[in-house]
Image (cartoon, rainbow, N blue to C red):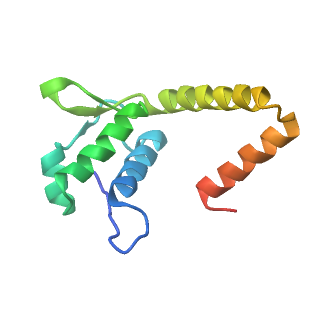
C-alpha cells in the first residue's frame, strides 16, 4: 500500500496542516489501517518536497491526537484513530461545557457558541 498525499503549495493552509488533515482522514476512514507503518520523517519530507521539520510537526500533532503512535526505532504507525479521536473530542467537549457553565452561560448560549465554532472550523459558516 502506498500513501497518497498531495500538498498544495498554493493553498492558504499550512503544509503541515494539509499533511495532518489528510493522514487523519485516511486513518479515520480506514483507508490507512491500524498498524500501517508511516514513512520516516526524512523520507516522507523528501517524497513530498517538504522540510523535515514540517513532516515532524504534523507527526507530533497526529501523535498528540492519538491518530499515530511512535514505537521508538521501529517507526511510526497508525493507531486506533477512531476510538482515540472520539475520546479526545468527548473530553474536550466536556471541558468546554464545564467552563461555559462556570462562566455563567446558559445552555442555549453555550450550544450556540459551540455550533459557531464548529461551523467556522469546518468552513461552512
Residue at the spot x=39%, y=32% of the render? 64
Residue 106 in sight here: yes
Asked if residue 2 can be seen in this view, the reply is: no
Percent from the top left, x then y, of residue 96? 67, 32
Q: Residue 1: x percent and y percent?
A: 25, 46
Residue most extreme to the bottom: 10
Locate residue 4, reporting x and y percent: 30, 56
Q: Is residue 110 above or below residue 92?
A: below
Against 57, residue 81 (above or below) is above
Position of 109 compared to 113: left or right?
A: right
Looking at the picture, tell me which residue is in the foreground, 79 or 104.
104
Q: Quadrant of the C terminus?
A: bottom right
Q: How many marks?
A: 0
Residue drawn at 85 percent across, 34 percent down? 107
Between residue 117 and residue 105, name the one nearer to us. Answer: 105
Asked whether 42 or 105 is in front, the reply is 105
Residue 74 quadrant: top left
Residue drawn at 19 percent across, 57 percent down: 51
x then y, percent, for residue 50: 21, 60
Q: Report the residue that reaches farthest toward the front.
A: 103
x 39%, y 54%: residue: 17
Quadrant for residue 68, please give it: top left
Viewed as shown, does residue 21 lie left or right of 122?
A: left
Amino acid at each position: 500500500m502506498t500513501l497518497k498525499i498531495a500538498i498544495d503549495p498554493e493553498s492558504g493552509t499550512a503544509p503541515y496542516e494539509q499533511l495532518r488533515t489528510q493522514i487523519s482522514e485516511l486513518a479515520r476512514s480506514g483507508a490507512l489501517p491500524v498498524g500501517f507503518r508511516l514513512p520516516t520523517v526524512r523520507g516522507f519530507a523528501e517524497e513530498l518536497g517538504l522540510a523535515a521539520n514540517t513532516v515532524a510537526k504534523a507527526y507530533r500533532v497526529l501523535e498528540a491526537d492519538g491518530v499515530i503512535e511512535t514505537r521508538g526505532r521501529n517507526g511510526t504507525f497508525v493507531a486506533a484513530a477512531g476510538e482515540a479521536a472520539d475520546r479526545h473530542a468527548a473530553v474536550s467537549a466536556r471541558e468546554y461545557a464545564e467552563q461555559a457553565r462556570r462562566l455563567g452561560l446558559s445552555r442555549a448560549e453555550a450550544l450556540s457558541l459551540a455550533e459557531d465554532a464548529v461551523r467556522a472550523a469546518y468552513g461552512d459558516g
